[in-house]
Amino acid sequence: MGPAEIKETILDILEGIAPDEDLSGLKDDVPLREQLELDSMDFLDIVMELRKRYRVQIPEDDYLELATMNSTVNYLTPLMKDLEKV
């Protein structure tokens, strides 16, 4: 799975967590929590959805790596490079 597919996956997860949010104007380099009304539980839902869909384990110490879309894609790319979309 490449960076573009990972970004689409994250957008799909965000759409499920925050269905009323407009994701079309998301900036890749601005923290997601500044752009969307996400609380800590929403953030954990993102992590759990990645685990459920792709069996990707993200240690709590690495949660800061998921702040922006760019940092999230960069963090997940090596973890998901050999995965196929479910």
Image (spheres, rainbow, N blue to C red):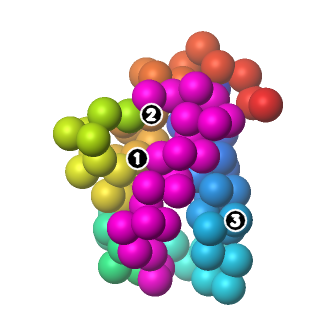
61 vs 74, nearest the viewer: 61
Find the distance from the CA under tag 2 to the CA under tag 3: 19 Å
Nearer to me, 3 or 54: 54
The image quadrant of residue 86 is: top right
Q: Name the residue type under label 2.
A: Leu
Tag in front: 3 or 1? 3
Q: What residue type is labelled 3?
A: Gly
Residue furthest toward the front? 41
Q: Which residue lies furthest to the top in this view?
A: 82
Residue 42 falls within the magenta-colored stretch: yes
Q: Are marks 1 and 2 in contact (CB under 8 Å)?
A: yes
Work out how far the residue at label 3 is from the one at label 1, CA to CA, in angstroms.
17 Å
The residue that disc 3 covers is 16
Q: Nearer the viewer, mark 2 or mark 3?
A: 3
Tell me if residue 41 can be seen.
yes
For label 3, the SS is helix
Q: Which mark is residue 76?
A: 2
